[in-house]
Amino acid sequence: MSEKSTKELADILGKTHLSEFDQYCKDHKESMKAGKDMFSIYIKNILSEKGMTQQTVFLKADIPERYGYKLLSGEKHTKQRDVILRICYAAELSLAETQRALQNYEMPMLYAKIPRDALLMIIFNERPGSIIEVNALLKENNMAPLRTSGSQD
């Protein structure tokens, strides 16, 4: 069974009787996974579509492999959005895909009214180079670079 969009689920719910709720949950379990599992599944699906390995993404993101694998397996959790942004950028996610990944990890999406977030949104759209170049752009604009996993909670 493939994952259904929110609109598809909403359409189905519009025709679902209260007594059918349990069956609805069973039938659409894959689409309704929440939290870190959803993030992991989402990223792994994108990597598979792009033919990228997790190892390559962690290297490009400048995140220790063991830490990255633990994040994607759900064994570890980070409270630092920058780590998730590093993974998204290294995995060559579009801005829309990145926003969804952040949502799936239950983190705030990039917000256009916050200057650093606005610059990051442009960076995800234009893809200027490596994480090192992204951090250089942030520093040039007097903004904090994307933190590494060494400074995480």
Image (tube, grey):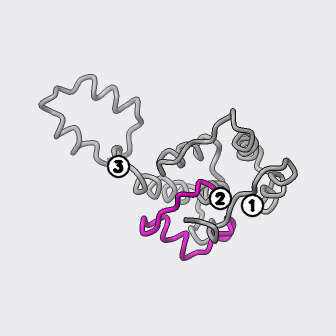
Q: Helix, strand, or loop for circle 3?
A: loop
Work out whether mark 3 precedes mark 2 in sequence or the reverse, and give the earlier one: 3
Residue type at mark 3? Lys
Hey, which quadrant is residue 62 in on the image?
Answer: bottom right
Label 3 CA crowd tier, 10 Å (few <14, some 14–19, many 20+) = some
Distance from Cα at disc 3 to Cα at disc 2:
23 Å
Label 2 CA crowd tier, 10 Å (few <14, some 14–19, many 20+) = many
Question: Is residue 35 at least partly visible in the picture?
Answer: yes
Work out whether mark 1 precedes mark 2 in sequence or the reverse, and give the earlier one: 2
Residue ranking furthest to the left: 19
Q: Position of residue 123 (x, y in %)?
A: 75, 46
Disc 2 marks which residue? 86
Question: Is residue 56 at least partly visible in the picture?
Answer: no
Q: Which residues are magenta?
A: 58-82
Q: Position of residue 51 (x, y in %)?
A: 58, 61
Name above or below for residue 37 compared with residue 26: below
**Do the residues under discs 1 and 2 have CB atoms within 8 angstroms?**
yes
Disc 3 marks which residue? 33
Identify the residue at horizontal 58%, vertical 75% (top origin).
65
| Horizontal arrangement in the rendering, residue 91 relative to residue 131 (left or right) | left
Residue type at mark 1? Ile
Q: Helix, strand, or loop for circle 1?
A: helix
Magenta stretch, main secondary structure, is helix
Hey, which quadrant is residue 135 in on the image?
Answer: bottom right
Check residue 131 in the rendering and tell me which mark sits there, or answer none. Answer: 1
- Residue 62, magenta (yes or no): yes
Residue ranking furthest to the right: 140
Distance from Cα at disc 1 to Cα at disc 3:
30 Å
